[in-house]
């Protein structure tokens, strides 16, 4: 298994994370030790048709919470998932006729400091391997083409990155609204701030790409405070957030990221119910909560809502949620469903030319294309984040346009792929209304305090609620641990 390298500068963050989560793990362990047989007896729960816990959402957060409940001896729970699969915003595309090789068309990377998801992978026996970036990156502009050795970076200005790193020290990742500079920083967009940094026109593309890839929006719509909170998660080091080498895009999972959820679901068996969307939740302020699904009613004493805040807004709550929480869900951006494509070749031919398969395009449909081949390069795969508005919805036409772009960048061999997959999350998955949250200026100042506090017997989980690496797979796993711990503690107190 490939180890995740950690720069020396992250030692303090690693120590804080270790202490914090060692404590959380010890708490779960304390509940679990000697209580597997007695959990229901000590709480007096789990009898009849009322469960101890219902978890809404079978992504990384929900399945992690379910796994922790099971480990603690709680067997009175189910996981309800609206989709016909597990994994949430992680999804593996199996390449036809390629011997089981896959390409991820959802979230896929981990990096330094993302210890929760790395630990989960080790526990599940899932190996990792490094993202391929050896060689030169191609930058396209109209008919122009430039090869650049970016050495595992995205080419953003290090001086400006250092300024963001310094600013992020005043913006707590888990609670940006508590920053001492919140009034100053939360009124600005990333675009406002960048406009003051005297950025060269040729460097602007890199910052647009950084904002789109990390935050789901162009700089003009990305809140500066929110972006700084993301940098804070990365040990207050912009390069650890925004690059490949020693960064959040450094490492991939053997078998694809969805394999984590698949393995957890296999362990949980019939505790996971697919194609079961929750439409209404009633009585959340009483002793027993009732969840109305497309396949009947489920009752529980505690509910872990492990879904996106904007998706929570699509559930009807009776009685209505407290206004602050309801306002947060109404205002949460739900308009950034990504479109990610995978072009498959018999082999990664670009590597023979000294190219790494990474492509940036100015004023075109490709935001960033990259080598997404399996660990041994048995087949060649170019994945791309695309601008949906600039790429036709007709799949054959979209494929033709992309192969021509890849041929310009990588050579004529790119014109003859053996497979193609186009995953437009906004069209194919009604339960993924946004992939990353493009939080605008002013949002955290107004709504931040309502993010985590429980509402009656409702516990808010999901990656957006994580104290660090919110929005990432690591944040999802952390939020799942925390949600399970909240539910277990509440049941024992009951």
Image: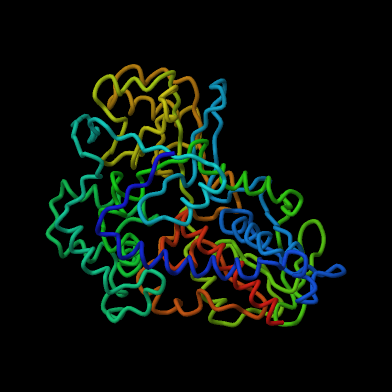
Residue 297: image x %, image y %?
Answer: 81, 64
Q: Is residue 315 above or below residue 152?
A: below
Q: Residue at x 48, y 53 (%)?
A: 117
Q: Nearer the viewer, residue 200 or 117?
A: 117
| Quarter in which the N terminus is drawn | top left
Which residue occupies 14% across, 62% down? 197
Q: Note whether residue 336 is visible.
A: yes
Q: Horizontal placement of 414 versus 491: left or right?
A: left
Is residue 386 at least partly visible in the picture?
A: no
On the image, the x and y values in percent for residue 15 come to: 36, 65
Query: How many tags in the picture?
Result: 0
- Which residue lies most toward the front here? 34
Q: Is residue 119 left or right of residue 440?
A: right
Residue 327 x/y as whole percent: 53, 76
Who is closer to the viewer here, 493 or 273?
A: 493
Residue at horizontal 55 percent and vertical 78 percent from the top: 453
Question: On the rendered image, what quadrant is the C terminus found in?
Answer: bottom right
């Amino acid at each position: 298994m490939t180890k995740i390298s950690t720069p020396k500068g992250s030692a303090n963050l690693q120590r804080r994370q270790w202490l914090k989560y060692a404590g959380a793990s010890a708490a779960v362990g304390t509940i679990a030790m000697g209580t597997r047989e007695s959990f229901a007896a000590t709480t007096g729960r789990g009898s009849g048709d009322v469960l101890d816990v219902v978890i809404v959402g079978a992504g990384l957060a929900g399945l992690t919470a379910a796994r922790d409940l099971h480990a603690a001896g709680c067997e009175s729970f189910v996981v309800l998932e609206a989709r016909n699969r597990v994994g949430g915003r992680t999804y593996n595309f199996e390449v036809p006729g390629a011997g089981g090789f896959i390409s991820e068309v959802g979230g896929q990377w981990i990096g330094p400091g993302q210890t929760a998801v790395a630990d989960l992978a080790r526990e599940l026996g899932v190996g990792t391997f490094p993202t391929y970036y050896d060689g030169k990156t191609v930058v396209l502009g109209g008919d122009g083409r430039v090869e650049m050795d970016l050495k595992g970076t995205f080419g953003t200005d290090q001086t400006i990155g250092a300024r963001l790193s310094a600013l992020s020290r005043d913006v707590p990742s888990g609670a940006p609204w508590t920053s001492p500079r919140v009034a100053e920083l939360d009124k600005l967009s990333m675009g406002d701030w960048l406009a003051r940094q005297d950025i060269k026109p040729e460097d602007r593309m890199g910052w647009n790409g950084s904002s789109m890839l990390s935050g789901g929006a162009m700089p003009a719509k990305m809140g500066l405070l929110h972006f700084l909170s993301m940098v804070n998660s990365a040990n207050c080091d912009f390069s650890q957030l925004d690059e490949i080498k020693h960064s959040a895009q450094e490492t991939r999972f053997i078998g694809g990221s969805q394999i984590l959820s698949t393995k957890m679901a296999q362990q949980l068996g019939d505790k996971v119910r697919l194609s079961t969307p929750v439409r209404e939740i009633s009585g959340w302020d009483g002793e027993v909560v009732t969840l109305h699904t497309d396949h009947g009613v489920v009752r529980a004493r505690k509910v872990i809502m492990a879904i996106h805040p904007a998706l929570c807004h699509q559930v009807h709550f009776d009685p209505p949620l407290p206004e602050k929480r309801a306002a947060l869900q109404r205002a949460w951006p739900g308009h950034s469903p990504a479109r990610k494509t995978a072009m498959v070749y018999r082999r990664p031919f670009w590597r023979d030319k000294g190219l790494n398969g990474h492509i940036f395009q100015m004023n075109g449909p490709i935001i960033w294309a990259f080598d997404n081949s399996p660990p041994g390069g048995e087949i060649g795969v170019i994945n791309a984040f695309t601008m949906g508005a600039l790429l036709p919805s007709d799949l054959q036409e979209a494929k033709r346009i992309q192969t021509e772009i890849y041929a310009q960048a990588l050579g004529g061999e790119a014109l003859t792929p053996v497979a193609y997959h186009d995953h437009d999350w906004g069209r194919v998955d009604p339960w993924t209304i946004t992939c990353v949250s493009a939080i605008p200026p002013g949002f955290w100042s107004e709504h931040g305090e309502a993010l985590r506090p429980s509402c009656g017997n409702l516990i808010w989980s999901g990656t957006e609620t994580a104290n660090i690496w919110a929005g990432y797979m690591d944040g999802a796993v952390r939020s799942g641990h925390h949600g399970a711990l909240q539910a277990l503690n509440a049941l024992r107190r009951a």
